[in-house]
Image: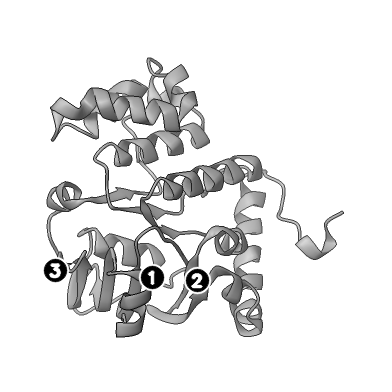
């Protein structure tokens, strides 16, 4: 929860979850009194072990999971449990981990779908997306289903940005991508953030996430167990011992299943 000193030094929060208890079924909560705040221009990362409630937190903030207790606020307005279309209109963008593009539509058609609520601004916003994502401009007439995983992820981000959101919620944007494509996705996300969009990102690649985020949250068993700057968390002995090693093993296991190279410990890099 924000304090008076935080508000004075950083400005009012763009988005804030306060003591959120939420779950998919009545009486079965995944989140328990969970808190998160993101300030203007910030990039905030959420890491934690599998089943900690990371994606559930994003979905609760975007109205996809019922909040049973607590509140979610956007620029000081209560948006708890509002419908997703209303949240998009108010300035919340959300990119799910899977099924995040229309595969039968072209790249340009996907982007147009992202701004169907404001048709008069389509030309302007398409130009902005072509500048931000040059590869999408090159493939504007290609079907989204024929694109690589990294390209589809870029398209999903671009479609969410068509409505000029004040905050962009990303659910594991690097999942299933090769290490090279992961790096491209992280760089692209940081570039989006530098345009002024506040970004809140759930990420399985914990160490890389903490490297690029201004602040981070470690979730465990539905609660925010640790919070601090990305650098502080990446170098916190307790976070390293309890989470980072385990999370890297999870990432390596998923890569091995996909036939991808495993991550390398930076201390052993050549």
Q: How many numbered marks have been drawn onto this rendered protein structure?
A: 3
Q: Is residue 10 visible?
A: yes
Query: Which residue is under mark 1?
Result: 53
Does dot 3 land on a helix, a strand or a loop?
A: strand
Q: Which residue is mark 2?
A: 48
Front one among 13 and 251: 13
Q: Residue at x 55, y 69 (%)?
A: 230
Which of the 4 quarters of the picture holds residue 56? bottom left
Give the structural element (helix, strand or loop) at label 1: loop
Q: Residue at x 14, y 66 (%)?
A: 77
Which residue is more in the foreground, 177 or 17?
17
In contact (CB < 8 Å): disc 3 and disc 2: no
In the rendered image, residue 99, in percent from the top left (x then y), is placed at 35, 41
Q: Position of residue 263 (x, y in %)?
A: 71, 55
- Residue 95 on image: x %, y %: 35, 47
Residue 186 shows which numbered tag?
A: none
Q: Which mark is residue 78?
A: 3
> Is mark 2 in CB contact (under 8 Å) with mark 1?
yes
């Amino acid at each position: 929860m924000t304090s008076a000193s935080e508000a004075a030094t950083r400005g009012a929060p763009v988005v804030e979850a306060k003591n959120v208890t939420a779950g998919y079924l009545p009486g079965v909560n995944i989140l328990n009194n969970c808190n998160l705040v993101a300030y203007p221009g910030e990039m905030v990362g959420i890491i934690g072990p599998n089943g900690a409630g990371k994606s559930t937190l994003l979905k609760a903030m975007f109205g996809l999971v019922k909040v049973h207790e607590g509140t979610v606020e956007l620029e000081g307005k209560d948006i708890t449990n509002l419908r997703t279309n209303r949240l998009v209109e108010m300035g919340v963008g959300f990119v799910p981990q899977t099924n995040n593009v229309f595969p039968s539509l072209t790249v340009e058609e996907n982007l147009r779908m992202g701004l169907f609520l404001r048709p008069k601004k389509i030309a302007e916003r398409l130009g902005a997306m072509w500048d931000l994502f040059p590869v999408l401009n090159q493939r504007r007439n290609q079907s989204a289903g024929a694109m690589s995983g990294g390209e589809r992820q870029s398209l999903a981000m671009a479609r969410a940005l068509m409505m000029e959101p004040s905050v962009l919620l990303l659910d594991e944007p690097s999942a299933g991508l090769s290490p090279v494509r992961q790096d491209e996705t992280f760089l692209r996300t940081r570039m989006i953030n530098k345009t002024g969009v506040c970004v809140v990102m759930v990420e399985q690649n914990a160490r890389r996430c903490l490297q690029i985020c201004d602040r981070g949250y470690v979730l465990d068993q539905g609660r925010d167990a640790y919070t601090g700057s990305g650098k502080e968390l990446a170098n916190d002995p307790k976070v390293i011992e309890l989470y980072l090693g385990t999370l890297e093993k999870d990432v390596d296991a998923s890569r091995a299943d996909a036939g991808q190279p495993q991550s390398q410990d930076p201390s052993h890099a050549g």
